[in-house]
Image (spheres, rainbow, N blue to C red):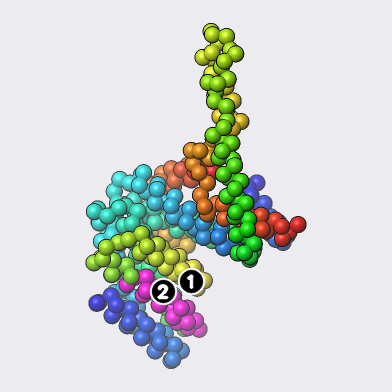
Amino acid sequence: MGLIGFVKKHLSKRIGIVTATIEEQAYNALERAVKDELKNQLVDRATDFQIFSVIFNICEDRLRNILSILRREPVDPKEVSKNIKKVFDMYEGLTEAAYDLPKPEGLLTFIPRGFKAVAFDIFKTQDEIINSQLTNLLRKPVEISDKIILAEAIYLLNQYK
Amino acid sequence: MEVGNDFVSLVDLLGKMEEEKKVDVSIVGVLDKLIANCKSDERFWAEREDMPVDESFLLYHSVRNSRLILQKMKTQFISAEKNHENPIVIDHAIEVAPLLSELFQSICSLKEQAITPQKISFISNKLKALRNMANRFGMLPSPKEELTEINKEKLERSFSRFADTVRAMFVEV
């Protein structure tokens, strides 16, 4: 069962919550995804515009249905802004940690000559698996809107404690 | 500006119907004219090959949604008149019409203006507000109704690829 299915099943427990920022960002993400896909798939504007207009509406309809089973939580902007500073600092620290990760090449020093190529592939794969979340920060920095959402989540967590 | 006049006619007629508490079927003709204008503008924005695809799409999408809402409004008026129903549809249309008019006329004005990201964002927000309002009053077509005007096979193919892209986006995040 997916997350939304779970929330629906336990509707009376009011466990699904949302904030105004999340609602807005969900709609923006949907709009961005439709536009990006259209840029990639476009063959004929007249046909594809119609198809993607329908897809956009169907997805928006589904988003509206999902939001209707969630409880909108008010957030205190002052408290959230205090958390935002901490969230920014956290991501800055994580990005620095990602830069400082040992490179697979550096681990080959003590590997016998004939095994270096095999060892390199193993280290690289291990590195990708273990540190993927950190290295992703270098490839794709976290968007400000996502940091705000995390700051709001911290605020709500403190409210529910 | 002809479209502006048609919206003025729509608002005037709605005001008259609200006073009389009675559906006037002449509204169907006004709505038909507006629907025809929307269809023509959908073609206009789809054919603007000189514009970035995301911008022309959003304008096309907004006009198409205006048309879908006008069509739904027309169906509700026809049904209310035919069945001699309580003309609650008049009150609903009075809520929706100003948003429709504002969105449609904003898009029309862009035919002769430079289009900026701010204007596109403004249209996007207006469309969202319009669809939310229309949804409150049952003036949005259901997904099933929307499917009647398109090639289902092509939709399924595009939807499937779109779902893969969205899935990939979230895995990446």
Per the image, is B90 magenta? Answer: yes
Looking at the rendering, in which quadrant would you find the C terminus of chain A? bottom right
Mark 2 near mark 1, Cβ–Cβ under 8 Å? yes
The residue that label 2 is drawn on is B99
Amino acid type of disc 2? Leu
Residue A146's x, y, as percent? 55, 51
Per the image, is A140 magenta? Answer: no
Q: Quadrant of residue A132?
A: top right
Determine the main secondary structure of the stretch shown in magenta: helix
The residue that label 1 is drawn on is B133
What is the chain identity of the residue bearing mark 2? B
Q: Nearer the viewer, residue B97 or A115?
A: A115
- Name the residue: 28% across, 66% down: B110
Amino acid type of disc 1? Met
The segment highlighted magenta reads B85-105
Q: Classify A4 as above or below B87.
A: above
Q: Nearer the viewer, residue B94 or B129?
A: B129
